C-alpha cells in the first residue's frame, strides 16, 4: 500500500514554530515508528522516545538514522508510569497519545 | 489521563514545556488531488470512540489547568494529509486501521472513486486530518 503520511511535513513545521529544541532534553510519549522523532531530534541535546507498541518500537530502532543513534533512545513505557527521575526533561511531547 | 499528565509534570523541569499534538475529530474531508489542484469528494463520519476520546483529552487538560499544574500558552489547528494512490487503498486503510475511530459512507466512496477515475493521470486520494497542537508550561 502506497500510503504517505504528512508528506508536506506540516506537523514538523508547526512543532518547530511552537518550541525551540536547541540543546534541550526531550521526552516524546507515543513515538510510534519515529516518523516525527527523526524530524526534530537533530537540534536537541537528547531525546528519549517511548511507546507501548513494541512492534512500532522495533521498526523505529531499525529506521533510526545513523547520526541519531547516540542521541535518540527508544524505550517501551506507558505515560502513566514513566521510568525516569523527576525534573529530567525540558520538553515533553504527547504525540497523538493523550 | 490526568495521572499520565501528573507523571509528565513530575519529569519536567520547572517552567518545562508540554506539547500536546493529536488528531481532532471534525468530519475530515476526503479529496482527490493532482498537480493541477484538488477537489473535495466527501467527509468521514466521526465514530463515538474518537469523539469521546477527544472530549476526554480536553477534559483532562482542563483538569490539570484548574489544578495549577500547567498553563496553556498557545493553541491552534492545522491540516495534515494522509494520501494514497487509489481510492481502494484508502478505503482499505480506513476500514482496517481507523475502523474504531472513523467511517466512510458508501455515497462518499462512490463519489471519490468516480472523481479519481475521471481525474488526471497523477490523481491520488487523501484525507485532510485536523490536528490540534497546544503548548503548555509547567507551573
Image (cartoon, grey):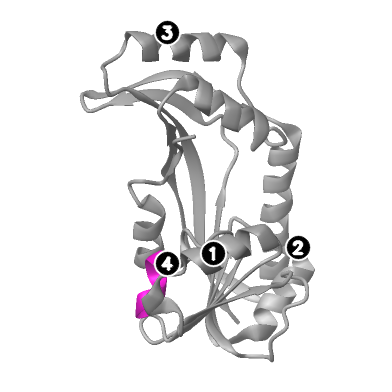
Which subunit holds the residue at mark 4?
Answer: A
The mark nearer the N terminus, 2 or 3, is: 2
Determine the CA span between mark 3 and mark 4. Answer: 37 Å
Q: Residue at x 69, y 63 (%)?
A: A54
Determine the CA span between mark 4 and mark 2. Answer: 26 Å
Q: Which mark is residue B1?
A: 2
The residue closer to the viewer here, B133 or B106, is B106
The residue closer to the viewer here, A6 or B66, is A6
| Corner quadrant of residue B34 | top left
Q: Magenta stretch: give its range.
A: A39-43
Determine the CA span between mark 2 and mark 1. Answer: 25 Å
- Depth-wise, is mark 1 or mark 4 nearer the camera? 1
Let me know if residue B135 appears in the view. Answer: no
| Residues tagged 4 and 2 counted as in contact (Cβ below 8 A) | no
Read off the residue under disc 1.
A60
Which subunit holds the residue at mark 1?
Answer: A
The residue closer to the viewer here, B16 or B94, is B94
Q: Which mark is residue B114?
A: 3
The mark nearer the N terminus, 1 or 4, is: 4
Looking at the rendered structure, the secondary structure element under dot 3 is helix
Magenta span dominant secondary structure: helix
Estimate how packed mark 3 is, as few (under 14), some (14 to 19) or many (20 or more) residues with alpha carbons within 10 Å: some
Determine the CA span between mark 1 and mark 4. Answer: 10 Å
Estimate how packed mark 1 is, as few (under 14), some (14 to 19) or many (20 or more) residues with alpha carbons within 10 Å: many
Read off the residue under disc 4.
A38
Amino acid at each position: 500500500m502506497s500510503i504517505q503520511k504528512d508528506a508536506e511535513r506540516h506537523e514538523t513545521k508547526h512543532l518547530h514554530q511552537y518550541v525551540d529544541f536547541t540543546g534541550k532534553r526531550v521526552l516524546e510519549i507515543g513515538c510510534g515508528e519515529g516518523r516525527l522523532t527523526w524530524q526534530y531530534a537533530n537540534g536537541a541535546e537528547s531525546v528519549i522516545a517511548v511507546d507501548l507498541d513494541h512492534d512500532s518500537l522495533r521498526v523505529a530502532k531499525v529506521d533510526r538514522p545513523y547520526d541519531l543513534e547516540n542521541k535518540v533512545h527508544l524505550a517501551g513505557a506507558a505515560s502513566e508510569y514513566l521510568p525516569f527521575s523527576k525534573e529530567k526533561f525540558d520538553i515533553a511531547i504527547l504525540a497523538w497519545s493523550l | 489521563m490526568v495521572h499520565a499528565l501528573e507523571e509528565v509534570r513530575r519529569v519536567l523541569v520547572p517552567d518545562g514545556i508540554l506539547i500536546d499534538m493529536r488528531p481532532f475529530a471534525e468530519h475530515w474531508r476526503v479529496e482527490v488531488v493532482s498537480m493541477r489542484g484538488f477537489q473535495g469528494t466527501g467527509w468521514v463520519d466521526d465514530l463515538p470512540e474518537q469523539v469521546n476520546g477527544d472530549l476526554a483529552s480536553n477534559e483532562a487538560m482542563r483538569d490539570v489547568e484548574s489544578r495549577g499544574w500547567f498553563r496553556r500558552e498557545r493553541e491552534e489547528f492545522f491540516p495534515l494529509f494522509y494520501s494514497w494512490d487509489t481510492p481502494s487503498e484508502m478505503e482499505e486503510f480506513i476500514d482496517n486501521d481507523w475502523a474504531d475511530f472513523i467511517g466512510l459512507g458508501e455515497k462518499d466512496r462512490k463519489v471519490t472513486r468516480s472523481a479519481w477515475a475521471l481525474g488526471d493521470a497523477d490523481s491520488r486520494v487523501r484525507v485532510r486530518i485536523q490536528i490540534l497542537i497546544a503548548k503548555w508550561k509547567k507551573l
